[in-house]
Amino acid sequence: MKKDEHKTHISGAGEVVEQKITDTLELNYMPYAMSVIMSRAIPEIDGLKPSHRKLLYTMYKMGLLRGARTKSANIVGTTMKLNPHGDQAIYDTMVRLSKGYEALLYPYVDSKGNFGKSYSRDMQWAAPRYTEAKLTPICNELFCDIDFDTVDFVDNYDNTMKEPLLLPVRFPSILVNLNSGIAVGMASSICSFNLEEIANATIGLIDDDDYDVRESINAPDFIGGGTVIIDRKEFNKILDTGKGSLKIRGNYEYDKKNNCIDIKQIAPTTTCEAIIDKVIEKVKSGELKEISDIRDESDKNGLKITIDLKRGTNVEILMQKLYKLTPLEDSFSCNFNILVGGGARVLGVTDILREWIAFRFECVRRRVYFKLQKAKNRLHLLEGLSEILLDIDKAIKIIRETEDEDLVIPNLMIGFGIDEIQADFVAEIKLKNLNKQFILRKLEDIEQLKADIEKRENILKNKSAIDGIIKDELKEIVKKYNVPRKTQIIYEEDVVEFEPEEEIDDSPVFVFFTKEGYFKKITPQSLRMSGEQNLKPGDKIIFESEETNDTELLFFTDKANVYKSKASDFENSKASVLGDYVASELEAEKDENIIFMAPTRNYEGFLMFFYEDGRVAKVELKAYETKTNRKKLLNACSTHAKLINVIVCTEDKDFIIHTTEDRYLIFSSAQLTMKLNKNVQGVKVASLKKNAFVDSAEFYDEEMFVNPTRYKSSNLPFRGAKISKEDAKSNQYQLF
């Protein structure tokens, strides 16, 4: 045999085949997308995804509805007969349905061992060999009708066993338990509601198709509690369309003795670690100065985040800050996307309940019909048995005298005028039971069976009778399983929004900034009594102005960053001291120097940025205004060339620029276009020869030059002019 003769050759293998992208999408991508949508991520009207249903049905068939718990590994292994996606995926599904994980209002898995917590990002659940599980009592309402032909069954993935397409749930579990999933091109996010409220809304819709579910449903209800803030317009939108957003706050208790806050309930969309991380971040940034420590004290008793407070802290104001700055208040986005009739649809609560009523109606109808057929079959057998009662001896004689076994049933049929099914039933009765007492006891059921058959036939003819059964079952379920509402409700109009602003004295102050990065804030009275300004050797004041104590200060650095502060953040100083070194006070980066300061009260006006290469940028001050109290802004100016000066303006002014060619040029800021982009490079104003650069820039004073037109041009860039003899002789000005 030649080498490689034994290998199988596949036609077309290794060939590069051209294919239209539309064909690739249709043949490869679309089947995958549909599989994810229909068989994985989107729940159906019974409130379950396929992975949930396969797991719960397996546990039901294992006898875990009433039996003792078994090892989770045993359940996972058995479930793989229905779900071939791997043991880890199955176990993750079990964890999220469990009581221990605390994600569902009405969990389906009664767990024992470490199943993690939904409110903890870092707490991992134990391996399946260490944990045990069974079904919770409420699963009776998922499976109690499953053996009465209420739902269709299909083959599993390898055609070795059957599994239900849906579970005949006796309550609208689709709205009672939280459910979310991400498919391809669509997603689903369904919040949980209180069982009693949903049951009452369902009963209302059964009685009146125009019933307004708002009369029964107050708000979502989550196992983690918290407080949901209801915007009436937005909540009505969720009920009507299935889309919208809700705000949920964590609840807290204030421990006056230990001066701390204990947070014991949080939103279902966040974790305690996420809250703690954000609080620590805000404490470090100086936005939460009232907190001295925060720690996670969650234990077997449940979630607990403890926040230690500094003395004199206003708890109400601090909590408003926490709600605003951290995930302690979070949003839940609703997208009620479910599979109905083989397609994904986004439905409001009313429409979902209508779909569930139609589904449950069919389940009850099929159950009644199944039991009706069973009763008719039983009655038919007993009616055949009643014929035997007339002459038991005759029956025994026929059986005894029949030589061929295959003729026993035909001979009984002939002898008593009964059909084959009835004759077969009689023939199977044990000899010890062929007595009058046994037969009479069996025949007592005939009248009851006739009554049951009549009752069930009437039910099938009467829609209101089936509706009544559904309503009675819902009332019974509420009575057995309902728990009081866990999530509190407040309406948005009742929420008091605290905007804690520190009262800042707006008295006048003089501010000074030096070339070496020192800042002084001096009151007018202190300045009048002071002598000469004390500065470091070689240092000089490059900016001074009269402001107020609530003025915001923008400090520009040589790394194109801006540090924002207020004049009130600095202590009052004196002329005799050096002042505050700003880079240290504002915790600037290592080797980062503060080079300019720009004060503003309301961010009106603009900044003029002068660069060494002759460019000038006119940037609107609004570009530096932020909604939050950010302390640092990146990319605050262009880095294309060395920054020479930054000047604050409230209106257009004339400026004078000096170059290393000893030329001066005067231009107006009105000649430049205002920009909102902070790091814009600006416009070329000064035309420079090679190796020349701008070395200074400032406001132009009208008395500086006798003939200022010599240094102006209507067209930019402009090279400027050397100073004239007339201007040089004038003693009316001081330049730079």
Image: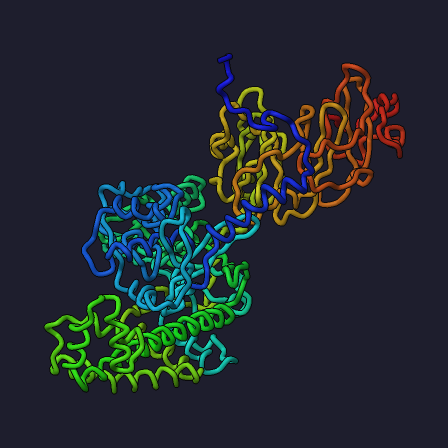
In this view, the residue in front, 299 or 324, is 299
Mark count: 0
Q: Looking at the rendering, which quadrant does residue 14 occupy?
A: top right
Look at 51% across and 59% down and name the residue there.
337
Residue 339 appears left or right of 674: left
**Residue 246: where, in percent of width, then height?**
48, 61
Could you tell me if residue 576 is visible in this image?
no
Rendered location of residue 179, percent (x, y): 42, 57
Q: Residue at x 71, y 45 (%)?
A: 650
The residue sitting at 30% across, 83% down in the picture is 452
Left/right placement of residue 450 relative to residue 39 reads: left
606 and 701: which one is in front? 606
**Is 477 drawn above or below residue 248 in the view shown?**
below
606 displayed left or right of 503: right
- Residue sitting nearer the eye, 349 or 136: 136
Q: Residue at x 40, y 72 (%)?
A: 366
Question: Which residue reaches farthest top?
Answer: 2
Q: 136 above or below 606?
A: below
Q: Nearer the viewer, residue 291 or 526?
A: 291
Which image quadrant: the C terminus?
top right
Give the image's coloring scheme. Answer: rainbow
Q: Position of residue 153 (x, y in %)?
A: 40, 59
Residue 421 showing in the rendered view? yes
Where 352 falls versus 627 (above or below)? below
**Percent of width and height locating residue 728:** 83, 22
